[in-house]
Image (cartoon, grey):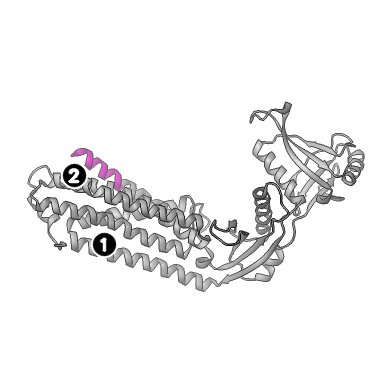
């Protein structure tokens, strides 16, 4: 008895903490403020087709490098919370394509965005002489770089060994590199990708072989990232603008508030229905449903998930799934009560007998969410992700919290009133 009451108090404290977290992190600039998609916040969406036909090895690495370059360029464009992501055609699509999706919240000048993003990335080597803060062009660019590779000290592949980056220049590049290094020993030869420094090694000696080694305080991941940028900065993936879409801030704001209103109205109707139909059990289910919603909101903020109109739809539908689980449980409990079972016994049996149906229903919905996320576009993925998280959270709220609350308020003796409150109301037969 007391363990259920303690658990119920813990659930209420959890709900209070989640409410505090949801409210206190709404301020603009907060790390956990809800991030809104373009359809809610307004802005510009650009979709590029990436031409990987000339990439024979490490196609995924080339695409990731392209994404990093565009992400760096978008940040220079001064956009708040930009989103740059890769999209691949689904396995069932007739033609396999790789696309780059760029979302720019608050930007409505499509031409300026395209001009800033659509340029081909440039890899350059620039010289910084001692006592100077500026970098001077050397004429050595990515066209002279044959390849770059990651090596570890003494040939070891251990994460504890010091990683180094080895550059291999073409014949013309080797001659130019030898000339630069011979005349500038002790100076910095910075490597710039798209105008931004990605490494600033110091020239230690003249290098005539065309093979140079960059060493330093690299972590293995930092060294891998540098190799990737060098390889695919020298051989960038061409991109072509396929489509652009602009959403005004007024339209986005209207969609956001309409989604919130729909969610609040839907929850209110569900709560009223549950209380009218199941009386005490319905009231408890409504309390558990509030905690369920707070769990979902906290997950959306903490992960974080960029919330779109389709994501709000997924959230609202998942509320229905959570209520559906409670309906199955309470109908089972009412059946046991009508069969003459003791109230506490009826609750235990009702939850036990409803569990297989709840489990199977939620599992099928979760499978559907995974398939939608795997095969869908970004809009569908937003729906699937929020819906999937809601399904998982509803299992906890319906099966665990509703049971804890019911058993916590049920007295050891004198259960006649409670039995009447739980079995009264409308029923299905």
Majority secondary structure of magenta residues = helix
Split into 4 quadrants, where in the image is the C terminus? bottom left
- In screen coordinates, is 206 left or right of 244? right
Q: Cβ–Cβ below 8 Å for labels 1 and 2?
A: no
Image height check: is 346 above or below 109?
Answer: above
Image height check: is 333 above or below 94?
Answer: above
Disc ID at residue 271: 1
Instruction: State the extent of the magenta-drawn residues as a range.
Output: 1-12
Give how far across and how far down residue 200 sits, in percent: 77, 42
Give how far across and how far down residue 301 sits, in percent: 46, 53
- Callout 2: few (<14), some (14-19), or many (20+) C-alpha neighbours within 10 Å? some
Q: Is residue 404 magenta?
A: no
The residue sitting at 7% across, 50% down in the picture is: 416
Q: Nearer the viewer, residue 63 or 402?
A: 63
Q: Does the magenta stretch include residue 9?
A: yes
In the rendered image, which residue does mark 2 sit on?
Answer: 348
Q: What element carries label 2?
A: helix
Give how far across and how far down residue 45 sits, in percent: 59, 66
- Callout 1: few (<14), some (14-19), or many (20+) C-alpha neighbours within 10 Å? many
């Amino acid at each position: 008895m007391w363990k259920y009451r303690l658990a119920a108090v813990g659930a209420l404290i959890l709900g209070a903490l989640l409410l505090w977290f949801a409210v206190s992190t709404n301020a603009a600039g907060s790390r956990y403020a809800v991030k809104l998609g373009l359809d809610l916040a307004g802005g510009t969406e650009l979709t590029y087709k990436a031409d990987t036909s000339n990439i024979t090895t490490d196609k995924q690495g080339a695409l990731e490098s392209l994404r990093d370059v565009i992400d760096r360029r978008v940040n220079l464009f001064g956009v708040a919370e930009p989103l740059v992501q890769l999209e691949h055609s689904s396995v069932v699509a007739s033609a396999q394509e790789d696309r780059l999706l760029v979302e720019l919240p608050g930007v409505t000048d499509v031409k300026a965005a395209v001009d800033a993003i659509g340029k081909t990335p440039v890899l350059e080597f620039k010289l910084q002489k001692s006592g100077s803060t500026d970098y001077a062009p050397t004429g050595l660019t990515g066209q002279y770089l044959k390849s770059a590779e990651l090596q570890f000290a003494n040939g070891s592949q251990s994460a504890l060994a010091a990683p180094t980056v080895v550059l291999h220049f073409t014949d013309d590049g080797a001659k130019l590199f030898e000339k630069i290094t011979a005349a500038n020993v002790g100076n910095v030869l910075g490597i710039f990708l798209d105008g931004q420094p990605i490494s600033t090694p110091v020239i230690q000696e003249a290098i005539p072989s065309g093979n140079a080694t960059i060493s330093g305080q690299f972590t293995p991941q930092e060294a891998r990232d540098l190799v990737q940028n060098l390889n695919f900065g020298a051989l960038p993936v061409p991109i072509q603008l396929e489509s652009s879409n602009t959403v005004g801030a007024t339209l986005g704001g209207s969609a956001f508030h309409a989604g919130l209103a729909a969610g609040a109205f839907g929850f209110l109707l569900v709560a009223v229905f549950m209380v009218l139909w199941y009386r005490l059990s319905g009231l408890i289910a409504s309390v558990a449903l509030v905690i369920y919603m707070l769990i979902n909101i906290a997950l959306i903020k903490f992960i974080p998930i960029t919330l779109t109109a389709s994501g709000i739809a997924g959230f609202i539908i998942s509320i229905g799934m959570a209520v559906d689980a409670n309906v199955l449980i309470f109908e089972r409990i009412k059946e046991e009560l009508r069969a003459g079972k003791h109230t506490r016994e009826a609750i235990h049996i009702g939850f036990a007998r409803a569990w297989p149906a709840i489990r199977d229903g939620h599992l099928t919905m979760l499978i559907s969410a995974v398939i939608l996320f795997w095969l869908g576009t970004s809009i569908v993925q937003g729906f699937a992700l929020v819906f999937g998280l809601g399904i998982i959270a509803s299992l906890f709220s319906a099966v665990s919290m509703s049971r804890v609350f019911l058993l916590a308020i049920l007295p050891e003796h004198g259960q006649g009133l409670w039995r009447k409150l739980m079995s009264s109301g409308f029923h299905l037969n």
